[in-house]
Amino acid sequence: MLEMPAKDEPSQYGHITWKDVINIVTTFLLLPLYVVWKIVASPRPNKPWRMTVTLAVARYLMDSFCYRELQYLSGQAVNVYARWTFLRGLPSTIDELPEKGTYFLWVGPKRLDRVLLYIPGGGYVLPPFDSFFAFCRYVQLELEAQNIQVGVAVFSYNLIPNARFPSQLHEAQSAIEYLLQSGVKPENIELVGDSAGCNLILQIFSHILHPLPTLKPFETVRFRGACLISPWVSPSGEIGAETFRRNSKTDIISADDLLLWAEPSLRDLSNLALPFIEPAKAPKSWFSGIDGLAERILITSGGVECMHEAHNHFYEWHLKGYHPDIQYLVQKDGVHDELLHEFALHNKPVGELAPLIVNWIAESFQ
């Protein structure tokens, strides 16, 4: 069993101390030196130099900051969204959802005939960044170029330490019910998520197939599809443990940091709840019936990310035999959530994965 690093949990979201402030200032002062050293010492020959810089900066910040410092620097999702829409001259449309602290943040025009519901990741500790919204806008515009109009709603849910499992599942269920009550047909909803957002999508499927007694049942619905980008299927790192540790040097986030982020979600988890948070540890037939919940499924993985072997296992063991229309794409030399990091600097894709996802979504809606 992989050893969990010492927990480092704030009493409230984004709470920092003076020691944290000193660390933040020092980290940013040393950032330029680190980037130069990283490019020289650990070049990524298969990537453009600007992408190499982006990944180096991201890894340095992940290594240097605990998640309470990252929360402080990131702010709240609604504020990130408001700034992003303002800078791009887009309308800021926020739906306040029934569960306190949850919102739909609409990218581009709000429309309900066809909806791409994006559930962002962040280990249940971080909000979506600008790049998440940029990716969603890219998908929307690329679909429009194919004469496919969709509304894109980014789901903002409560994060640790303010909420833990099953709170986010309850909030996601309430959010989807809100969409359905607004007149959106389930067959016109495309679920898209990254990392922990995929974990939450899989929790939704798990709750439909195996209702948690502490939550109200979720009526069986069949979504248009589910796109899972670098899904967080083994927060403990125990599935594919060797790769989890080996790829710690090449990924955008280290194995130790992933375990630190996972600790609050895994703490005091009952056997009943384990398959919801750790879907890769679920019984083999756990997702039998998933073909009735999503018309199509796409899973993507980075070839050098810590979770890569866990993705292989989850696809082969839990999904491949239970759905007739499922695709699994591996991005060569890709890190965790790499396509989102592409949009952090370029506001457009660098690799082939984003266009492939767009084409897959377009096929779903045609």
Image: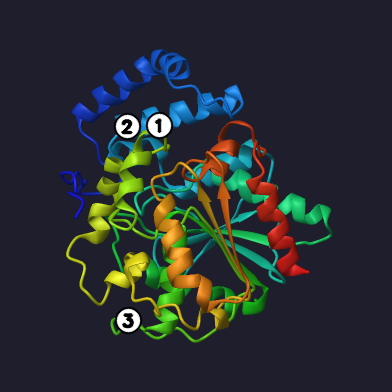
> As drawn, is 66 to the left or to the right of 343?
left
What numbered label is drawn on residue 212?
3
> As drawn, is 191 to the left or to the right of 18?
right
* CB-based contact (under 8 Å), mark 3 and mark 1: no
> As drawn, is 350 to the left or to the right of 282?
right
* CB-based contact (under 8 Å), mark 1 and mark 2: yes
Mark 2 is surrounded, within 10 Å at the Cα level, by few (under 14), some (14 to 19) or many (20 or more) other residues, namely some
Does 77 appear above or below 104? above
Q: Looking at the figure, which quarter contains the N terminus? A: bottom left
The kind of residue tagged 3 is Leu
What numbered label is drawn on residue 59?
1
Q: Which residue is mark 2?
A: 63
Does 133 appear above or below 341? below
In the figure, residue 274 lies in which quadrant? bottom left
- Residues 155 and 99: in front is 155
Label 3 to label 1, Cα distance in Å?
A: 37 Å
- Residues 77 and 6: in front is 6
Determine the residue positioned at 70% across, 69% down: 114
Residue 86 at x, y percent in the picture: 62, 40
Mark 3 is surrounded, within 10 Å at the Cα level, by few (under 14), some (14 to 19) or many (20 or more) other residues, namely some
Determine the residue positioned at 28% across, 56% down: 238
Under circle 1, the secondary element is helix
